[in-house]
């Protein structure tokens, strides 16, 4: 009699390697591993696949998802200028729904009734994986080994691995940080960073140089957009994944893209996080600058409000929700004329917009200039102010601080 199958989101690290053996021994399941390449810095995916096969899994699928991640997920994040709590570009929240989608696809391929992940019970990612799975296939059952097992800390996992002949990654006990990364950047937590008073140590950063060590002359870069999507850097046309890589290098070499903040997690606690997002922060900075001249004022004000709703929905694992889908439609409509070029100046850890142009620009020099050749009719302002303040004047006479009613 064949065993039931479970599809595991597998990274090849300690947690998910132990998950493989735990699912086999504790749940008596046949395991299929899915390892998605979303641009993380880790290498050796073939070795990780072989490791999983050596542990007795039915299959280990290594999927190159970098272009799908860029074209289907990052484009929407850029359109929405996705900054959670207006602090940092969403990172893990963007890759989890894609990985969950692949878990569901592979589960259907193998006839599995379970999917599994290696997320902890106090993080956001457990919600993101499971909400996405439920949205894509409500009949699949989710197993979260790390929430269930009695292994309370990393040394416990290492001991379990040794006892069950699971290869332990080199330095499994040495890395003081918990890192999650993809093409869009790196999230860094734990260790020295758990005290919010502690300044991050130099070893926390790998994508960005210390601002003190960056060039003593500014670096200028131009980014081109078509309908809200980045299409070129410094005149060179590239696909989005290549643009992100190029800007990670340019921005990182100039010390731009480091963030140190405290955020509110979905599960109700505050968490000190450091983020290294040079390319992401650069693209959002440039995209906002282009929107400033291409998007009508009332629409832009409304969009800014809805951007926070979009970021919160995605942070909370609602990528496949009706709300987020509707917000995507709104964001997409705002991008129709966001076409043009933005010039950026990098210097000593800073990035400033120093130029923007577009064939669809709503910036009218004749209206904006204070020179003699202005086309703005300043005399019309008097009538505008009279009408605009009519309600205020009526209130002031009857109920305002100088009215008889207010003085009574």
Image (tube, helix red, strand yellow):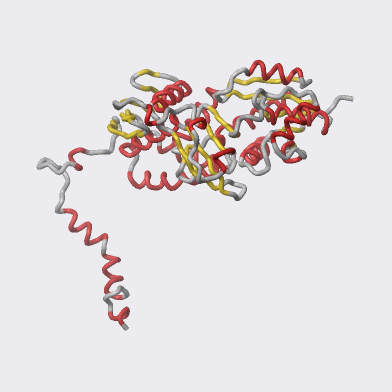
Q: Residue at x 86, y 24 (%)?
A: 2
The vertical placement of 281 against 66, above or below, is below
Percent across and percent down for residue 223 are 35, 26
Tell me if residue 203 comes above or below residue 52 in the rendering: below
Q: Is residue 13 left or right of residue 382?
A: right
Residue 329, horizontal then vertical, whole percent: 48, 38
Corner quadrant of residue 406: bottom left
Would residue 327 appear left or right of 403 to someone viewing this image? right
Q: How many marks?
A: 0
Residue 404 vs 9, above or below: the answer is below
Residue plotted at (52% across, 42% down): 326
Q: Which of the 4 quarters of the picture holds residue 57? A: top right
User: Could you tell me residue 135's position as x and y percent?
Assistant: 65, 39
Q: Is residue 310 visible?
A: no
Q: Residue furthest left?
A: 372
The answer to whether residue 251 of the structure is visible from this angle is: yes
* Image quarter of the C terminus: bottom left
Quadrant including the N terminus: top right
Q: Which residue reaches farthest right?
A: 1
Q: Residue at x 48, y 35 (%)?
A: 77
Q: Which residue in the rendered view is the most extreme toward the bottom?
A: 408
Image-based side of 155 in relation to 222, left or right: right
Q: Nearer the viewer, residue 380 or 228?
A: 228
Q: Position of residue 38 (x, y in %)?
A: 56, 25
């Amino acid at each position: 009699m064949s065993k039931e199958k479970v599809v595991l989101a597998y990274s090849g690290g300690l947690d998910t390697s132990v998950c493989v053996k735990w699912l086999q021994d504790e749940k008596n399941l046949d395991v299929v591993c899915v390892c998605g390449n979303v641009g993380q810095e880790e290498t050796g995916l073939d070795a990780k696949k072989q490791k999983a096969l050596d542990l007795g899994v039915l299959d280990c699928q290594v999927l190159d998802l970098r272009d799908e991640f860029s074209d289907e997920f990052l484009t929407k994040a850029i359109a929405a200028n996705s900054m959670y709590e207006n602090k940092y570009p969403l990172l893990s929240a963007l890759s989890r729904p894609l990985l969950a989608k692949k878990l569901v696809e592979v589960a259907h391929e193998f006839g599995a009734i379970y999917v599994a992940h290696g997320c902890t019970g106090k993080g956001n990612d457990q919600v993101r994986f499971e909400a996405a799975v439920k949205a894509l296939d409500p009949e699949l059952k989710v197993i979260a080994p790390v929430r269930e097992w009695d292994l309370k800390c990393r040394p416990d996992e290492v001991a379990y691995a040794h006892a069950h002949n699971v290869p332990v990654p080199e330095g499994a006990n040495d890395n003081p940080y918990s890192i999650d990364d993809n093409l869009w950047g790196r999230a860094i937590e734990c260790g020295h960073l758990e005290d919010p008073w502690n300044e991050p140590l130099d070893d926390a950063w790998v994508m960005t140089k210390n601002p003190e060590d960056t060039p003593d002359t500014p670096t200028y870069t131009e980014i081109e957009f078509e309908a809200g999507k980045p299409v070129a850097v410094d005149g060179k046309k590239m696909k989005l994944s290549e643009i992100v890589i190029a800007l990670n290098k340019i921005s990182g070499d100039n010390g731009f893209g480091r963030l140190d903040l405290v955020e509110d997690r979905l599960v109700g606690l505050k968490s000190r996080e450091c983020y290294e997002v040079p390319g992401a922060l650069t693209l959002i900075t440039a995209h906002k600058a282009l929107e400033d001249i291409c998007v009508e004022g009332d629409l832009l004000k409304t969009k800014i409000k809805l951007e926070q709703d979009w970021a919160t929905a995605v942070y909370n694992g609602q990528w496949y929700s009706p709300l987020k889908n509707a917000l995507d439609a709104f964001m997409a409509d705002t991008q129709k004329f966001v076409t043009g070029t933005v010039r950026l100046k990098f210097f000593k850890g800073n990035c400033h917009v120093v130029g923007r142009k577009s064939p669809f620009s709503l910036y009218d020099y004749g209206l904006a200039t204070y020179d003699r050749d202005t086309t703005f009719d300043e005399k019309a302002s008097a009538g505008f102010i009279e009408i605009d303040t009519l309600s205020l004047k009526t209130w002031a006479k009857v109920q305002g601080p100088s009215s008889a009613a207010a003085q009574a």
